[in-house]
Image (cartoon, rainbow, N blue to C red):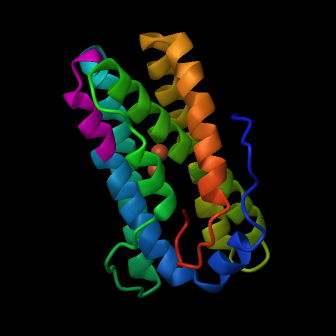
């Protein structure tokens, strides 16, 4: 796993635990966006040879989306509007335009989002054990899949240009750290 340069803020877990219904709605949208993002990556010529891998991720994310929707339904939580995430948009805004460099940046961003999700799901699974066993199991069950997505995206970038991926990863890890320090009181995962 990545060597993050900033820890998840101490107020993140209490905030999420206090707003579980809203967080679940946000999580549903995250999975939906993860599915569409995998499909969007297929627009890059550099990734045409990876279209099967990207489809596999899109299918998994769509399955995750459906799992969260089922959970919402069982808990009588209404599916609502997504909340914007300053962390995600901050990362995405730093993607450079152009062919190869845009693909590498986009893959690194996706990888960091998957990596942070993986890390946060692990924390949540642990914290929920005593209070909500079903939800704890649900989050624990997603950890491996999101970890695999993290690895797949970073390896896709490395396969295109290893040195450039290292350079940009250095940049994006600093950006992640900077964005993580921004106050974020919204009832969202990221
Ligand atoms: Fe997912
Ligand atoms: Fe994922």
In the rendered image, residue 172 lying in the magenta stretch gets the answer no
Residue 129 in sight here: yes
Residue drawn at the location 49% of the way across and 73% of the way down: 24
Magenta span of residues = 37-46
Residue 56 x %, y %: 35, 33
Q: Indicate the position of residue 152 as horizontal and vertical percent values.
A: 49, 27
Horizontal side of residue 181 vs 51, given as left or right: right
Question: Is 11 positioned to the left or the right of 178 in the image?
Answer: right
Asked if one can make out residue 121 in the rendered structure from this viewpoint, the answer is no
Q: Residue at x 56, y 38 (%)?
A: 172
- Callout count: 0
Q: Residue 83 is drawn in which quadrant?
A: bottom left
76 in relation to 142, above or below: below
Q: Residue sitting at 65 percent across and 85 percent down?
A: 18
- Which percent across, then down, holds residue 79? 33, 79
Characterize the magenta stretch by its predominant secondary structure: helix
Q: Position of residue 118 (x, y in %)?
A: 61, 48
Task: Specify whether 48 is left or right of 108.
Answer: left
- Quick check: is 43 in the magenta stretch? yes
Reply above or below: 155 against 81.
Answer: above
Q: Quadrant of the C terminus?
A: bottom right
- For the N terminus, the quadrant is top right
């Amino acid at each position: 796993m990545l060597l993050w340069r900033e820890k998840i803020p101490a107020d993140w877990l209490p905030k999420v635990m206090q707003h579980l219904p809203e967080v679940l709605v946000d999580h549903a949208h995250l999975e939906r966006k993860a599915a569409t993002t995998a499909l969007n990556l297929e627009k890059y010529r550099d990734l045409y040879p990876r279209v099967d891998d990207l489809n596999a991720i899109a299918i998994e994310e769509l399955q995750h989306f459906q799992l969260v929707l089922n959970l919402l339904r069982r808990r009588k939580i209404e599916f609502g509007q997504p909340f914007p995430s300053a962390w995600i948009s901050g990362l995405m805004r730093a993607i450079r335009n152009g062919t190869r460099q845009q693909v590498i940046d986009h893959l690194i961003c996706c990888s960091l989002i998957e990596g942070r999700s993986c890390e946060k799901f692990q924390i949540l699974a642990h914290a929920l054990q005593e209070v909500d066993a079903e939800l704890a199991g649900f989050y624990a069950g997603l950890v491996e899949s999101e970890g695999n997505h993290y690895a797949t995206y970073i390896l896709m970038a490395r396969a295109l240009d290893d040195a450039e991926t290292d350079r940009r990863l250095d940049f994006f890890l600093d950006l992640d750290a900077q964005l993580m320090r921004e106050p974020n009181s919204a009832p969202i995962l990221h």
